[in-house]
Amino acid sequence: MRKNSFLAWDVIEKKTRWVFEKFSLDNVITSRVRIARNLKKYPFPHNMSYSEAKEVENILLKELVRYPSDEIFVIKMDEINNVEKQLLIERHIISKEFVESPIPSSVVILPAEGISIMINEEDHMRIQCLQSGFNLKKALRKIEKVDNFLDERVEFAFSPDIGYLTACPTNVGTALRASVLIHLPALAILNRTGEIFSAIEDIDIMVRGFYGEGSHPSGNIFQITTRETAGKSEREIIEELEAVISVILEYEEEGVKEIMKKEDIKRKIEKKIKKIKEYNSITTEKFLYSFSFLCLGKKLEIINVGDRTLRNLIMSILPGHLQFNEKKEIAPLTRDIERGKIIKKKLRRILNNV
């Protein structure tokens, strides 16, 4: 690991904490709107040569650094280490697939707008806006500003008949996807997520894991996302997802009220919380499961813990975050031990009172 690699990254890390702002405060952790765009006359990334990918990267970076924003971070993926990449994945600023790209690629981060732009992922650009909490329309407005800015400066691959052309056929049209990262501890402990998720998948809404496509749910945290974009406007896509999420949030709130009346379930939750202090070593997946009980226990007034404490805990124990804070790469088993120490230190007083 380069000796000076974390100097600028300390700034980047602080400027991207908006992703965790609502982690323990609201059920909706983040709202994301993402659009795919490709330059006309260039093949999609999976068919590009190295020189073509470099040319696309240079064209887009030249324009993006001119975007009127207070701060712009440009990060070339071949110039950062594995810990820094993992940190960006855990912040949902880049995708796991993007890290594995063999062609020249960069990410541009606009902290004030909550925007990150992956260059040469599946498409030439994946422009996404992440807003903390349930803020899909706000995310859409910010995305539209970036899209309009670029539309005046580069020529996108576009068909008057079918809309924006994309590497994946399901993105053709508006090329927009919307999603929320949502925490549903009450519905999970009542075993009702399966029934709800089955119903929404019937109306073309997908349920994914903590890291999105290809990942599994962790700690009762799910990504709920729109599917095909063809034939729908941006506003229709956003409003459909908003309606679905609003219904799910109502079910979750009803679940919390139901649990409040059931002493057997409350005792089960209290028992799960007490067990946390027994772990000398704990995996990320097991911790997120325990973290879910901490958040639900807070809502049920089983424990008295501040939102800042819980947010700081999350930013201490995720694999990339833990290694970033230690300024070094750490083997998985050693991370599990360190994670156990961190949890005991940060939650000692709280767990001793349970």
Image (cartoon, helix red, strand yellow):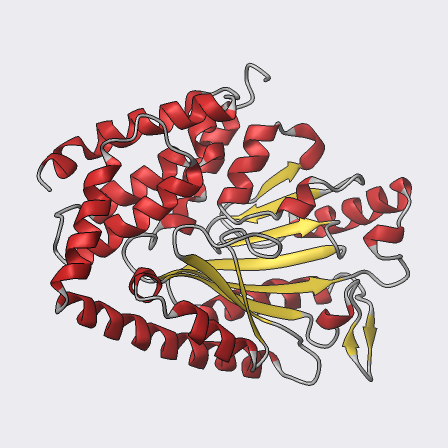
Q: Position of residue 201 (x, y in %)?
A: 55, 76
Residue that appears at 52% across and 49% down: 92
Q: Can you say whether 312 is above or below 95 in the image?
A: above
Relative side of 299 to 22, left or right: left
Query: Which residue of the protein is positioned furthest toward the left in this rendering?
Result: 353
Residue that appears at 54% across and 41% down: 88
Q: Can you say whether 203 is above or below 103 in the image?
A: below
Q: Position of residue 250 (x, y in %)?
A: 30, 77
Query: Which residue of the protein is positioned furthest toward the front in this rendering?
Result: 264
Depth check, front residue: 309 or 144: 309
Residue that appears at 77% across and 46% down: 57
Q: Can you say whether 17 is above or below 246 in the image?
A: above
Depth check, front residue: 14 or 155: 14
Relative side of 23 to 284, left or right: left
Tell me the quadrant of the picture where the N terminus can be found. top right
Q: Position of residue 26 (x, y in %)?
A: 30, 61
Residue that appears at 63% across and 37% down: 75
Tell me the quadrant of the picture where the C terminus can be found. top left
Depth check, front residue: 57 or 128: 128
Relative side of 277 to 84, left or right: left
Q: Residue 160 falls in which quadrant of the image?
A: bottom right
Depth check, front residue: 349 or 150: 349
Q: Residue 249 falls in which quadrant of the image?
A: bottom left
